[in-house]
Amino acid sequence: MNMILFMIIASLTLSITLTALNFWLAQMNPDSEKLSPYECGFDPLGSARLPFSIRFFLVAILFLLFDLEIALLLPLPWATQLDSPTTTLAWTSTLILLLTLGLVYEWLQGGLEWAE
């Protein structure tokens, strides 16, 4: 028996066994405390449906945008070993300049202000 077939059979056996154990040992009759939306120990005082500020979502999207663009700079240590490191330096400087201009623009537009 080759190794790949053995690993597939072992994975399937382990998955089926753990799934069967989960269904067999799971508690199927939860009490009223577990069915309530709050598990912190006290009854809710107000509505749980308060709207979030749109600023929260804007800052989260800005963080994701800048975080993903910074990930473009990760291959730089390997790019310096290319034939022309000046091209790598030019592209890196362009990317950092673009990120800085985007940050300044958001700052001037008030996208990073929490309170108005």
Image (cartoon, grey):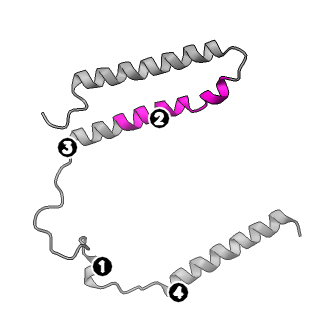
Query: Residue 77: x and y, percent?
Result: 63, 29
Is label 3 or label 2 in front?
2
Q: Quadrant of the N terminus?
A: bottom right
Residue named by callout 3: 53
Marks 4 and 2, the one that precedes in the sequence: 4
Residue named by callout 2: 68
- Distance of label 4 from label 1 (alpha carbons): 20 Å
Query: Residue 30: x and y, percent?
Result: 34, 84
Q: Which mark is residue 34?
A: 1
Element type where label 1 sits in the image: helix
Element type where label 3 sits in the image: loop
In the rendered picture of this protein, how many numbered marks are placed on residues? 4
Marks 4 and 1, the one that precedes in the sequence: 4
Q: Is residue 70 magenta?
A: yes
Of residues 71 and 28, the one drawn nearer to the viewer in this rendering: 71
In this picture, which residue range is highlighted in magenta?
62-80
Marks 2 and 1, the one that precedes in the sequence: 1
Give the residue furthest to the right.
1
Amino acid type, callout 3: Ser
Residue named by callout 4: 24
| Residue depicted at 34% across the width and 24% down the height | 103
- Distance of label 4 from label 2 (alpha carbons): 43 Å
Which quadrant of the figure has residue 59? top left
Marks 3 and 4, the one that precedes in the sequence: 4
Of residues 107 and 65, the one drawn nearer to the viewer in this rendering: 107
